Image: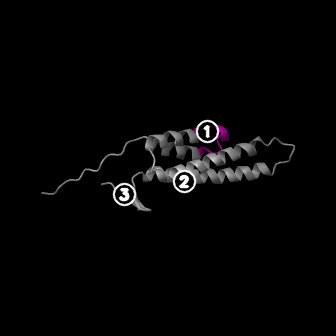
Amino acid sequence: MIYLLHIGGFLMKRTAEFVTGLIGGILGSVFSFIVMFWAGNQPVTEDNGLFVTSIIVLLLQIVALVLSCLVNTMNNKIYGVITIVIGLITLLLSALVFFIPAILQFVSGGLALRSLKEPVIKESI
Protein backbone atom coordinates (compact mmCIF):
# COMPACT_ATOMS: atom_id res chain seq x y z
CA MET A 1 0.00 0.00 0.00
CA ILE A 2 1.32 3.44 -0.89
CA TYR A 3 0.98 6.06 1.82
CA LEU A 4 0.89 9.62 0.62
CA LEU A 5 2.13 12.55 2.69
CA HIS A 6 -0.27 15.48 2.59
CA ILE A 7 1.65 18.79 2.67
CA GLY A 8 0.38 22.21 1.70
CA GLY A 9 -2.77 21.07 -0.07
CA PHE A 10 -1.25 18.49 -2.40
CA LEU A 11 -0.24 14.87 -2.04
CA MET A 12 3.45 14.01 -1.97
CA LYS A 13 4.07 10.96 -4.10
CA ARG A 14 7.84 11.35 -4.34
CA THR A 15 8.81 11.52 -0.69
CA ALA A 16 12.13 9.67 -1.12
CA GLU A 17 13.29 12.08 -3.82
CA PHE A 18 12.17 15.04 -1.72
CA VAL A 19 13.97 13.89 1.44
CA THR A 20 17.25 12.84 -0.21
CA GLY A 21 17.36 16.00 -2.34
CA LEU A 22 16.57 18.18 0.65
CA ILE A 23 19.22 16.58 2.87
CA GLY A 24 21.79 16.75 0.06
CA GLY A 25 21.00 20.41 -0.61
CA ILE A 26 21.17 21.35 3.08
CA LEU A 27 24.46 19.50 3.62
CA GLY A 28 25.89 21.01 0.44
CA SER A 29 24.90 24.51 1.51
CA VAL A 30 26.42 24.06 4.97
CA PHE A 31 29.64 22.64 3.49
CA SER A 32 29.75 25.54 1.00
CA PHE A 33 29.52 28.09 3.79
CA ILE A 34 32.28 26.31 5.72
CA VAL A 35 34.58 26.21 2.68
CA MET A 36 33.72 29.81 1.79
CA PHE A 37 34.52 30.96 5.34
CA TRP A 38 37.79 29.02 5.32
CA ALA A 39 38.81 30.30 1.87
CA GLY A 40 37.82 33.87 2.77
CA ASN A 41 40.21 33.84 5.74
CA GLN A 42 43.24 32.94 3.62
CA PRO A 43 45.90 35.61 3.08
CA VAL A 44 45.42 37.94 0.13
CA THR A 45 48.57 36.59 -1.51
CA GLU A 46 46.89 33.20 -1.90
CA ASP A 47 44.81 32.33 -4.94
CA ASN A 48 41.12 32.86 -4.20
CA GLY A 49 39.87 30.30 -6.72
CA LEU A 50 38.54 28.17 -3.88
CA PHE A 51 36.38 31.08 -2.71
CA VAL A 52 34.88 31.56 -6.18
CA THR A 53 34.35 27.81 -6.53
CA SER A 54 32.56 27.65 -3.19
CA ILE A 55 30.23 30.47 -4.29
CA ILE A 56 29.41 28.56 -7.49
CA VAL A 57 28.77 25.37 -5.51
CA LEU A 58 26.60 27.30 -3.04
CA LEU A 59 24.45 28.61 -5.90
CA LEU A 60 24.14 25.06 -7.28
CA GLN A 61 23.10 23.78 -3.85
CA ILE A 62 20.44 26.49 -3.55
CA VAL A 63 19.08 25.43 -6.95
CA ALA A 64 19.09 21.81 -5.73
CA LEU A 65 17.16 22.82 -2.60
CA VAL A 66 14.53 24.66 -4.62
CA LEU A 67 14.21 21.77 -7.07
CA SER A 68 13.81 19.22 -4.29
CA CYS A 69 10.96 21.28 -2.87
CA LEU A 70 9.30 21.31 -6.31
CA VAL A 71 9.77 17.61 -7.08
CA ASN A 72 6.03 16.86 -6.91
CA THR A 73 5.02 19.75 -9.15
CA MET A 74 7.47 19.28 -12.03
CA ASN A 75 8.24 16.57 -14.56
CA ASN A 76 10.16 13.75 -12.86
CA LYS A 77 12.49 13.14 -15.81
CA ILE A 78 13.55 16.79 -15.97
CA TYR A 79 14.04 16.86 -12.19
CA GLY A 80 16.12 13.68 -12.31
CA VAL A 81 18.43 14.87 -15.07
CA ILE A 82 18.93 18.35 -13.56
CA THR A 83 19.61 16.91 -10.09
CA ILE A 84 22.14 14.40 -11.42
CA VAL A 85 23.89 17.15 -13.41
CA ILE A 86 24.02 19.41 -10.32
CA GLY A 87 25.49 16.55 -8.29
CA LEU A 88 28.08 15.83 -10.99
CA ILE A 89 29.13 19.48 -11.33
CA THR A 90 29.32 19.80 -7.54
CA LEU A 91 31.49 16.71 -7.29
CA LEU A 92 33.83 17.85 -10.07
CA LEU A 93 34.22 21.39 -8.72
CA SER A 94 34.73 20.48 -5.11
CA ALA A 95 37.57 17.93 -5.27
CA LEU A 96 35.58 15.42 -3.17
CA VAL A 97 34.79 17.85 -0.33
CA PHE A 98 31.10 17.59 -1.24
CA PHE A 99 31.06 13.83 -1.73
CA ILE A 100 28.08 13.08 0.56
CA PRO A 101 25.79 15.83 -0.80
CA ALA A 102 26.65 14.84 -4.38
CA ILE A 103 25.84 11.18 -3.70
CA LEU A 104 22.52 12.17 -2.11
CA GLN A 105 21.71 14.27 -5.17
CA PHE A 106 22.61 11.36 -7.46
CA VAL A 107 20.25 9.11 -5.47
CA SER A 108 17.47 11.71 -5.59
CA GLY A 109 17.87 12.15 -9.34
CA GLY A 110 18.05 8.43 -9.95
CA LEU A 111 14.91 7.79 -7.91
CA ALA A 112 13.10 10.52 -9.84
CA LEU A 113 13.86 8.82 -13.16
CA ARG A 114 11.81 5.78 -12.18
CA SER A 115 8.08 5.73 -12.84
CA LEU A 116 5.63 5.35 -10.00
CA LYS A 117 3.36 2.33 -9.96
CA GLU A 118 -0.32 2.88 -9.52
CA PRO A 119 -1.64 1.35 -6.30
CA VAL A 120 -3.68 -1.80 -6.79
CA ILE A 121 -6.91 -1.75 -4.82
CA LYS A 122 -8.17 -5.22 -3.97
CA GLU A 123 -11.82 -5.68 -3.29
CA SER A 124 -12.72 -7.99 -0.43
CA ILE A 125 -15.33 -10.61 -1.21
Amino acid type at circle 3 is Leu
Does label 1 or label 2 sit earlier along the sequence?
2
What residue did someone put label 1 on? 89
- Circle 3 Cα neighbour tier, 10 Å, few/some/many (<14 / 14–19 / ≥20): few
Q: CA distance from mark 1 to mark 2?
A: 18 Å
Q: Position of residue 41 (x, y in %)?
A: 81, 52
Q: Position of residue 70 (x, y in %)?
A: 49, 52
Q: Secondary structure at mark 2?
A: helix
* Relative horizontal placement of residue 40, taking residue 18 as reference (left or right): right
The region drawn magenta spans 88-99
Does label 1 or label 3 sit earlier along the sequence?
3
Residue at 45%, 51% in the rendered image:
73
Q: Are marks 3 and 2 in contact (CB under 8 Å)?
A: no
What residue did someone put label 3 on? 4
Location of the N terminus (image quadrant): bottom left
What residue did someone put label 2 on? 23
Q: Secondary structure at mark 1?
A: helix
Q: Secondary structure at mark 3?
A: loop
